[in-house]
Amino acid sequence: MPQLQFELAFQRWEDGERVRKVLHEPNRWEVHSAEEVAVTLDDLRLRILQQPHQLAGAGVNPDKLGVAAALWDGALVLAAYLVAQPRYRYLGMRCVELGAGVGLVGLALAAMGARVTITDVGKVLPLMRDNLAANGYHPARGPQEGCGWAEADALEWGKPGWMEGPVARLASGGLDLVVAADCCYIDQDGASPSTPAFVQTCAGLCGPDTRCLVAFERRAPEVRTCLLEEAKKFFKGVRRVPLGQVPRPLRLEYVDIWELTRPL
């Protein structure tokens, strides 16, 4: 697997001055201080708008975006893996990104020719739409023949009627690829309560030939255990993508990509 050209460029305040930073490997502590990050993945150039002031305090103020407000390493790794595959595969492909936040993975797919719907809970829609516009996807313009396209929609797994409503609507017509990065977390009780509904959502979106790729950081073994237990209830195929298939410098030991196929 050849090395991927990778760069994160942004501005941040240091000692009262605005300083331009350029990174060639992930560093969330620096990245999360920026309101805009320019992401380079080989020939793809993506603008990612963030709201760093919204990262903390979501537990106290439910209107805050929390982790959806910024770019995370799992999304970078998954985007790098997708970019490293033959590009012709994505032309006209129908894709959904779950728990998209700033929408990097979906935007990368659209830049390679896919038709993508990026989704998250309702309060994240304005930020997702800002990122779509920042990368040239304006609703008024609409999709162009032969070009990739991205749009945003609300989807909250576990909410009453979520499978019969948004999941059924997104799955109608058939999807080729479902992607998600850093959607599974552990709570203060050491459990991962939203993971079963997340996996059910993945299965509801997948037809017999749909691939589902789920990336997440290994923050706690309970999350991995819960994800795999639930995945085996809904999918015949559950396998970890070999780390060697992720291009450097985004071959991160602490990020896994799982492929789920053939829903039961």
Image: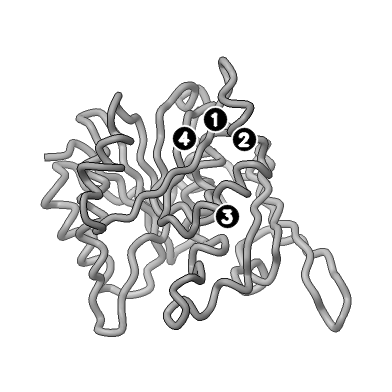
Q: Amino acid at mark 3?
A: Leu
Question: Tag 3, which secondary structure?
Answer: helix
Q: Which residue is mark 4?
A: 116
Q: Which residue is mark 1?
A: 149
Q: Amino acid at mark 4?
A: Val
Residue drawn at the location 37% of the way across and 68% of the way down: 218
Q: CA distance from mark 4 to mark 1?
A: 6 Å
Which residue occupies the extreme top position in the image? 145
Residue 95 - label: none
Is 17 above or below relative to 5?
below
Q: Which residue is mark 3?
A: 127
Nearer the camera: disc 3 or disc 1? 3
Q: Which one is earlier in the sequence, the residue at label 4 or at label 2? A: 4
Question: Tag 1, which secondary structure?
Answer: strand
Q: Which residue is mark 2?
A: 137
Nearer the camera: disc 4 or disc 2? 2
Question: Tag 2, which secondary structure?
Answer: loop
